[in-house]
Amino acid sequence: MRNDQVASIYRKIQQQICTELETADGHAVFKTDHWENEIGYGYTMVLDQGDAIEKAAVNFSAVRGKVSERMRKALRIDEGEAYFATGISSIIHPRNPHAPITHMNVRYFQLSSGKAWFGGGIDLTPHYVNKQQARWFHQELKNLCDQYDADFYPNYKQWADTYFYLQHRKETRGVGGIFFDHQDGSSDAGFQKFYAFTQALAKAYPRIYTELLTLNRDKECTKEEKRWQDLRRGRYVEFNLLYDRGTKFGLESNGRTESIFLSMPPMASWTYDFQAEKGSPEEATLNLLKKDIDWIHIT
Amino acid sequence: MRNDQVASIYRKIQQQICTELETADGHAVFKTDHWENEIGYGYTMVLDQGDAIEKAAVNFSAVRGKVSERMRKALRIDEGEAYFATGISSIIHPRNPHAPITHMNVRYFQLSSGKAWFGGGIDLTPHYVNKQQARWFHQELKNLCDQYDADFYPNYKQWADTYFYLQHRKETRGVGGIFFDHQDGSSDAGFQKFYAFTQALAKAYPRIYTELLTLNRDKECTKEEKRWQDLRRGRYVEFNLLYDRGTKFGLESNGRTESIFLSMPPMASWTYDFQAEKGSPEEATLNLLKKDIDWIHIT
């Protein structure tokens, strides 16, 4: 069965990701919660209070149920009575505000009608945008995508720009990355292609993050920079509760709340009408939270 | 014009509320932002870093526009092409975790079809539930309601239990209060009754809060209690972004983002799978975050 096959390999990759992130942090160890309930099972792996990583969550789940009316709308499902879904979802909140927040997700959906699809993505949310590092990040994603399909990077990069966008703030969540959904998992060719691609993506994730963490974890930071980090984390909370499809799906399918809310930062703050100073690094970052930036060629 | 009449009196009451809250705090002063945009105007009044009040926001706005498809659903509007809306919305986040968060809103809606209605409410979200204070709070609301209609308190209390509920947490937001929506503002009798009632409610709000603040502002508190406060503030964020109709309406109508997000706490945190200790005050509070508690008669 394809669903068991995907679930089983995703679960293995989840464990690999955690091992690599433990090595990257150098100190902290993931704790694992195994859960089972009426809709399925999962492993929730959480790293708390590491040396460099303040909080990392790597979630695996495999669930099934009836497609509700609300799920139908939220997920744009147009056929089938029942679904199976499995995926890995991860987020990392570093301690140092000069290191970025990152997020990765791969997921496989199968409907009782036989239709199946893959979705996923990786995106980067620096508290302070570093152009060189953003360029490197996008180049890594392009290199990975190009091994599977030359159209992937340009299409999925644009998709990420559209998806990771806070309409009410007129800001992108960060420097984007790649995002894709409803990619053919029904045909044999489609299934094989995205089964391989989503695995490669999930495996690349800890390697890419380790590089960015290493570059930034020991940078000095001020109290004001920590305060800015808390404000940016507040934006992250806004995105996750107002727009994120994973959160929506989790809540609509009566998923395990503590696992759904793992993406929340350890701490976040809101200040009324915060204005970045003219010429400050904060202002420079805000000016780069835009769609359609060609990160591969930015200087 | 009724809409001008309501907007004008609500704006006056907004100023009274701020004056009374300044007196209650004893130190801090509200700052006022006047804004105007394509949909209307408003006064955003914010108190930041007071002695006892960490953050208070009192928002007044009067806006108009076309009823969009999304607003139609979100607000259950079944007729009319254009709307006018005015209201006061306020929230107070105290410093001391033994003092409660509180929220008050009164609003008036008018459609181009001629249909009009009032809505509003007051509710209390203690970080630590104090039964005696919750009972007093509900008794004050009942006394106020009973002056207008003996059915108000029982009906609106139940409505608050239903509305201020975090489905995904299986928790009420706090000890509730009263909530009402779509109350007749079209007929002369309906308009007069709710015009008076919403004013009385808005005026009672700072008096009631001052009493609760005074009782709790100087209580000693530990680091663990502050931490619990941050976690409870996290729940408040979840409610406001996932369920709150005011937030939804603000976002759907392209309202002023900084005013919409004024309800956010200054700081909030999330801890994976936090478990209150057996027999602790935190556990006692969680056990009281339930619907259908008869607060008037609790002992």
Image (cartoon, coloured by chain):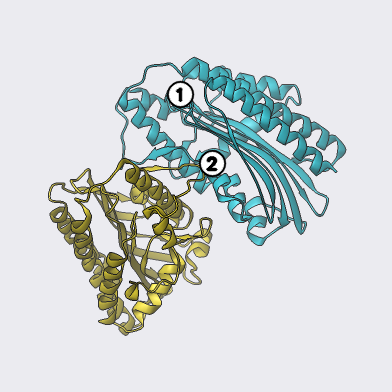
Chain colours: A cyan, B yellow
Could you say which quadrant of the image residue A276 lies in? top left
Could you say which quadrant of the image residue B191 lies in? bottom left
Position in image of residue B207 (x %, y %): 19, 64
- Amino acid carrying label 1: it is Val
- Amino acid carrying label 2: it is Leu
For the image shown, how many numbered marks are present on the structure? 2
User: Which comes before the other along the chain, label 2 or label 1?
Assistant: 1
Q: Nearer the viewer, residue A128 or B87?
A: A128
Identify the residue position indicated by label 1 in the image.
A129
Is residue B243 shown left or right of residue A12?
left
* Image quadrant where one finds the N terminus of chain A: top right
Position in image of residue B279 (x %, y %): 41, 55
Q: Name the residue located 31 percent from the left edge and 61 percent from the top edge.
A: B130
The crowding category of the residue bearing disc 2, from other C-alpha atoms within 10 Å (few below 14, some 14 to 19, many at least 20), is: many
Q: Looking at the picture, does residue A87 appear above or below residue B13?
A: above
Mark carried by residue A250: none
Identify the residue position indicated by label 2 in the image.
A262
Residue A138 in view here:
no
